[in-house]
Image (cartoon, rainbow, N blue to C red):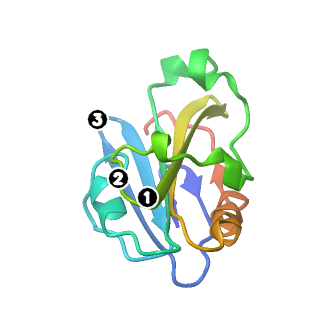
Amino acid sequence: MSAHGVTVELPRGWDARASKRDGIVTLHIANYAIPSRDGEFGPRATRTMPTGGVFIALTEYRPQLASKGLYRARRAPRRLAPGDFSPNAVLNARRHQLGHQRFFTVKGRPFCLYAVIRASRNTARVVAEANTVLRELRIERRKQAD
């Protein structure tokens, strides 16, 4: 999947969508089928999340925010741990769902990574699936026309 200077190699069976509204780029990635249209942080996609599900939203914000405040971190997350996830970090609280949010800047582009998992007996395995995708995330410098 490649869109708007963001590329990710998806494992077999994963789904992804990219959108751009008012200059804001959002990429949705999940290990289950996701709706073609959804809000920035995937309220529809997370509503249909199965047990063992992983949903990742990567949203880019205005360039003026790059490297400032929340976006100070200079590296995209490549590895999350089960302890990073909390029921208090989801946009819409749903039974068995845990979320994590991280802000960062890569190549002058500020992003928010929002990840949601549906807890299962083996949460570590579900988080490892998310990490497989995060390791394959590539972000290019923004093109002037973009």
The residue that mark 2 highlights is 19
x, y percent for residue 33:
38, 76
What amino acid type should be assigned to the residue bearing mark 3? Asp
Residue 48 is left or right of residue 80, and the answer is left
Residue 36 is left or right of residue 25, and the answer is left
x, y percent for residue 77:
70, 45
Asked if marks 2 and 1 touch (Cβ < 8 Å), the reply is yes
What amino acid type should be assigned to the residue bearing mark 1? His
Residue at the image point whose x is 38% and y is 37% from the top: 24
The residue that mark 3 highlights is 22
What amino acid type should be assigned to the residue bearing mark 2? Ser
Q: Nearer the viewer, mark 2 or mark 1?
A: 1
User: Sequence order check: which comes first, mark 1 or mark 3?
Assistant: 3
The residue that mark 1 highlights is 28
Position above or below: 138 against 54: above
Estimate how packed mark 2 is, as few (under 14), some (14 to 19) or many (20 or more) residues with alpha carbons within 10 Å.
some
* Residue at mark 2 to residue at mark 1: CA–CA distance: 9 Å
